[in-house]
Image: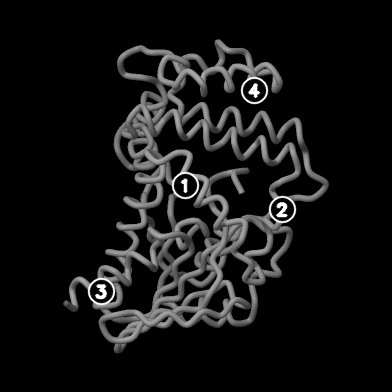
Amino acid sequence: MLRRDFGIGLMSTVVARLAIPEFEPNSGQPLHVLKRERACIYLLGFGEARDESWATPQIHRAFQESSDLWLEVSRDPGSEPDAASKREQLTHDPGGRSFFDVLEPRVRVRTTEYCAQLGIPLERIAKQRPWSAFYTINGAYWSRNKESFERQYPEEVLMNWAKARGKSIRYEMPSQLDFARFMAAMPDAAQSQYISFLLDFLDDQTAGRNQGEFGWIKGDRSAGERAVERMRTRTPDLYRIMQVQRNAWWARTIDRLLKRGGTHFIGIGQMHALGPDGVLRQLYSRARLLDG
């Protein structure tokens, strides 16, 4: 988790029939199945992995049956003229404030200490917005704390499968420019909490408290649940954006796909499927509201 993003994995099988989904937990499978009349959606919530042991025959079959793949963020830079330049502009504060000006006082102190530990010159990130500096700090940490194995990212495997089979790939955020706009639009409180969330994770990583991160493969959701609860309680402004708002988008999209019909495969980070505002909880609440 957090080597690249918030992804961490999903752990039960859910069958949605008619209007209101019925939840049928199966702690041994990291795949959810949602069905409504002639529609079927396979939803895989994943984290990082050591190998492809997560790609079980069940997941292979589900992917083969699906007509398309849905993921969170595209690697495409964007089709707009000067997309790369526009994205770069979004990494800087439009008002000219420094990275440290935006941070809450306590987070500013912690960040300064981390920069010293990781050898990051303060002037290197001073002109970045917090959402962009997040990746600078994260990258510096892992460059100094190299692991003995190479991590695998399931979304990359899924993309390769889709390309090899000629399946369409669709995204929540269709380009890197869209992603940058989304991140840059976060208010100051959420920007600061984005850094705080990262530093909390790095503190736990250094202290050896981030155990069970690969448990999602066998249905252990404890690591993901801890991360969601930490975000919900410690960084509520960030939580509203990353969990409540983004998961609402996915719930609307899934509901639309279920109404449209066909078979679809969705791959998202585990945190989006967990907690009181997870995608499946929101889908269930949405179905009850519409049904009532």
Of callouts 4 and 3, the N-terminal one: 4
> For this rendering, which residue is in front, 292 or 15?
292
- In front here: 45 or 124? 45
Q: How far apart are marks 4 and 2 (CA)?
A: 22 Å
> Residue 20, image x and y in percent?
29, 80
Real-space Cα separation, disc 1 to disc 3, in angstroms? 32 Å
Q: In this view, does 71 lie above or below 143?
A: below
Name the residue rendered at 53%, 75% in the picture.
12
Of marks 1 and 3, the one in the foreground: 3
Instruction: Give percent across and percent down for residue 201.
Output: 61, 40
Mark pair 2, 3: CA separation: 35 Å
Give the number of the mark in front: 1 or 2. 2
**For mark 3, what is the residue?**
287
Name the residue rendered at 25%, 77% in the picture.
260
Q: Look at mark 4 in the image and give the residue it sits on.
A: 114
| Badge 3 element | helix
